[in-house]
Image: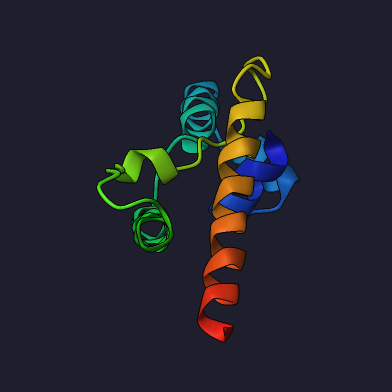
Amino acid sequence: MWCKIAQATGMSIEAAQQTLSLSEVRLWEAFFKTEYQRLERSDWYMAQIAMKIHQTIAEKGRRFKVKDFLLTFYNPDASFAGEKEDQGKMMHWVRSLIAAGKKKTK
């Protein structure tokens, strides 16, 4: 964790250990625990692009939601229960891209 704090603050690990109070360290720890779930705007853009590509390939009349294409990020403190589902979503997205490329080259 000290490496993450040092990277985020621009301090050396030693300087961070000497400078930060215990309450500040706990705040950083709480921040890092929730950081992996924070979605960036680019995540939403990429999910929208994947959805549109998939809509062009899929059967007519089939509806999709952007949330179907958002990846959940790995939480080192949680179990691996959702990891298989996320891998499946990612592989589905990759196959859609490959199929779209093949469709346009024909």
Q: Residue at x 30, y 44 (%)?
A: 62
Within the image, what quadrant is residue 101 found in?
A: bottom right
Q: Residue at x 65, y 43 (%)?
A: 4
| Residue 17 percent across, percent down from the top left | 67, 36
Quarter of the image with the N terminus is: top right
Within the image, what quadrant is residue 54 found in?
A: bottom left
Which is nearer the eye, 97 or 4? Answer: 97
| Residue 27 percent across, percent down from the top left | 46, 27
Q: How is the image coloured?
A: rainbow
Tally the numbered discs: 0
| Residue 53 percent across, percent down from the top left | 41, 63
Asked if residue 9 shows in the view, the reply is yes
| Residue 81 percent across, percent down from the top left | 63, 16
As drawn, is 50 to the left or to the right of 103? left
Quarter of the image with the C terminus is: bottom right
Q: Residue at x 35, y 56 (%)?
A: 55
Q: Residue furthest bottom?
A: 105
Asked if residue 75 shows in the view, the reply is no
**64 above or below 42?**
above
Which is nearer the eye, 30 or 96? Answer: 96
**73 above or below 45?**
above
Q: Residue at x 39, y 39 (%)?
A: 68
As drawn, is 37 to the left or to the right of 106? left
Which is nearer the eye, 106 or 4? Answer: 106
